[in-house]
Image (tube, rainbow, N blue to C red):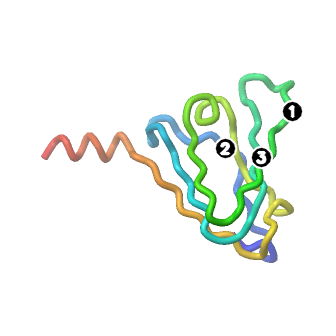
Amino acid sequence: YRRKLGHYLSSHVDDRQLSKEPIANLSIAGDCIMTFKNERVASMDPVRVLLKRCTLQVLTGRARYDYSHGIDNKDLLSDRRVSVTMRESPLTATKRNER
């Protein structure tokens, strides 16, 4: 993500059918604030979490399924953010078992 280019991560909940639990995200470069919003209880205040570079974030349970997460452009605290998301796809596991 490049702050000066207007990049951001739209708020979303990762697809349950495409990603099993857990989902891990490694922030390699660039600090940011990720905002979590409870999708089941709209009256709850959003939770803002500082993700520094070299942070490993693991989403499981309620954080994985009940909260959307995203990064506004203004919350990119460095000009450039690089991260790697790791997940297991049930589709991949099915194909592996068919061999």
User: Residue sitting at 47 percent across and 54 percent down?
Assistant: 86
Of pointers 1 and 2, the one earlier in the residue sequence: 2
The image shows residue 17, relative to residue 58, as above or below, that is: above
Going by the numbered disc 3, the residue's amino acid type is Thr
Pinpoint residue 63: horizontal percent, then vertical percent: 64, 34
Of pointers 3 and 1, the one earlier in the residue sequence: 3
Instruction: Find disc 3 in the rendering and name its residue.
Output: 35
Residue with the most extreme left position: 99
**Is 43 displayed left or right of 66 in the figure?**
right
Instruction: Find disc 2 in the rendering and name its residue.
Output: 12
Label 1 vs label 2: CA separation? 16 Å
The image shows residue 38, relative to residue 97, as above or below, that is: above
Instruction: Find disc 1 in the rendering and name its residue.
Output: 45
User: Residue sitting at 71 percent across and 52 percent down?
Assistant: 10
**Is 90 displayed left or right of 47 in the figure?**
left
Contact, mark 2 vs mark 3 (Cβ under 8 Å): no
Pinpoint residue 69: horizontal percent, then vertical percent: 70, 44
Pinpoint residue 60: horizontal percent, then vertical percent: 55, 35
User: Residue sitting at 33 percent across and 43 percent down?
Assistant: 91
User: Residue sitting at 60 percent across and 50 percent down?
Assistant: 57
Of pointers 2 and 3, the one earlier in the residue sequence: 2
Going by the numbered disc 2, the residue's amino acid type is His
